[in-house]
Image (spheres, rainbow, N blue to C red):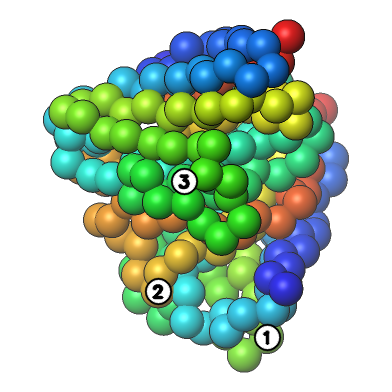
Amino acid sequence: EVQLVESGGGLVQPGRSVRLSCVASGFSFDDYAMHWVRQAPGKGLEWVSGINWSSHNIDYADSVKGRFTISRDNAKNSLFLQMNSLRVEDTALYYCVKDSTSSWYGLSTAFDFWGQGTVVTVSS
Amino acid sequence: QSVLIQPPSASGTPGQRVTISCSGSSSSIGSNTVNWYQQLPGTAPKLLLYSNNQRPSGVPDRFSGSRSGTSASLAISGLQSEDEADYYCATWDDSVRGPVFGGGTKLTVL
């Protein structure tokens, strides 16, 4: 059974940093691309960042580019999101998401498994 | 404003057939396949359809999808109370250079 367990969320002041983690199990982690997708309170889904299996292909939504950094450790079946210079508008539930393929960029790949998410609240 | 446009709400009675539209552009739906996600209340999204009309294992054949030009649609036949959820379309956008979602459609089963 595929499991994705996020952690690291919480209440953080504007301008500060937080690091999200996601531990994966139930599949061969290093065979698949991974993503972070967020959902602001009462709002829809927004793709945040994606990383292919080898970490050679990484990209970000314009709204977070230059502030967030995605990374992965295949030896530890883990995905990370370093979030710096946080803004109030970054407040959301952040989902760790498994891609259905190893390489996602330029393709309409399916996000086939989602974690339960971790909440990040940016407020003074 | 989402790149993909969905109606904010839809409704139907048990047993009915409902459709949810998803409108994009030549750089999104016009050039790429569409995936659909179902988000039941208080839960994480779940992949419902991929590659326009393919169902993952375990998804009932009451759910179907289509794509034509720059639009796509999700159809649910034999509507059931447990289908009450938010539905999102998604695809790759060649202009944005990233995955994009629709704003979501809240389906109510009357």
Tag 3: amino acid? Leu
- Residue B85 at x, y percent in the picture: 68, 27
Disc 1 versus disc 2: nearer the observer: 2
Q: Residue shown at 75%/31% (left/top)?
A: B82
Q: Earlier along the polypeptide chain: callout 1 or callout 2? A: 1
User: Label 3: chain?
Assistant: B
- Residue B22 at x, y percent in the picture: 37, 23
- Residue A103 at x, y percent in the picture: 35, 70
Q: Is residue B96 visible?
A: no
Query: Badge 1: how crowded within 10 Å, few (<14), some, or many (20+)?
Result: few
User: Label 2: chain?
Assistant: A
Mark 1 element type: helix
Q: Residue shown at 53%/27% (left/top)?
A: B77
Tag 1: amino acid? Lys
Q: Nearer the viewer, residue A89 or A114?
A: A114
- Residue B86, compared with residue B8, is above or below; it is below
Q: Nearer the viewer, residue B58 or B36?
A: B58
Callout 3 and callout 1 share a chain: no
Q: Quadrant of the N terminus of chain A?
A: bottom right
Callout 1 and callout 2 share a chain: yes
Residue B78 figure quarter: top right
Q: Which residue is mark 2?
A: A102
User: Label 1: chain?
Assistant: A
Callout 2 and callout 3 share a chain: no
Q: Which residue is mark 3?
A: B49
